[in-house]
Image: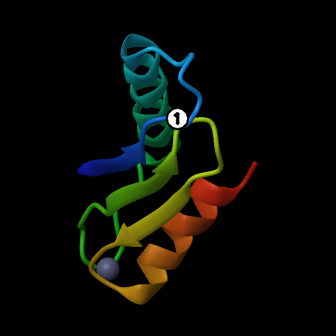
Amino acid sequence: MPIILEILPATDARHEAAVEALVLDELRRRIRKRIELMVCQVHGREPTVTVRGRVGTRYDYHVTGCCTAFVRSVKWRLEED
Ligand SMILES: [Zn+2]
């Protein structure tokens, strides 16, 4: 499933690039784990997830997919804590 990360570097200069790469890896893994089994029951398609934000802050999840109902259920899954 496509997961697109559009995450800016942390403003905090103490963050090393290597650390940020780990943070993004972890984020990608967490997203995949959370929605990996989600396939639209009607169309059999997977969602595309785009995450935007800055390292160390809250991220915004943008989901696109085959239909509104499926996109909504993926968003719920992503945003629940
Ligand atoms: Zn669908």
User: In the rendering, at what x and y percent does residue 41 appear?
Assistant: 37, 71
x 57%, y 53%: residue: 59
Give the secondary structure at mark 1.
Answer: loop
Q: Amino acid at mark 1?
A: Ala
| Rendering quarter of residue 32 | top left
Give the colouring mode of the picture: rainbow
Residue identified by numbered label 1: 10
Residue at 33% x, 73% y: name it: 64
Q: Residue at x 62, y 66 (%)?
A: 76
Does 53 sit above or below residue 47?
A: above
| On screen, residue 54 above or below 13 | below
Choose top left, top right, bottom left or bottom right for residue 38: bottom left
Residue 48 lies left or right of residue 11; in this view the side is left
Say whether residue 20 is left or right of residue 60: left
- Residue occupying image coordinates x 24% and y 68%: 44
User: Could you tell me residue 49's position as x and y percent?
Assistant: 36, 58
State the image quarter where residue 21 is shown: top left
Q: Residue furthest bottom?
A: 68
Most extreme residue toward the front is 13
Answer few, some or many: residues within 10 Å of disc 1's Cα (few below 14, many 20 plus, some between 14 and 19): some
Query: Residue 50: image x %, image y %?
Result: 36, 58
Query: Whereabouts is ligand 1, in terms of quadrant?
Result: bottom left
Q: Using the image as rendered, state which of residue 14 and residue 70 is in the foreground.
A: 14
Between residues 66 and 16, which one lies in front from this camera angle? 16
Q: How many discs appear?
A: 1
Relative placement, left or right, of 73 versus 65 is: right
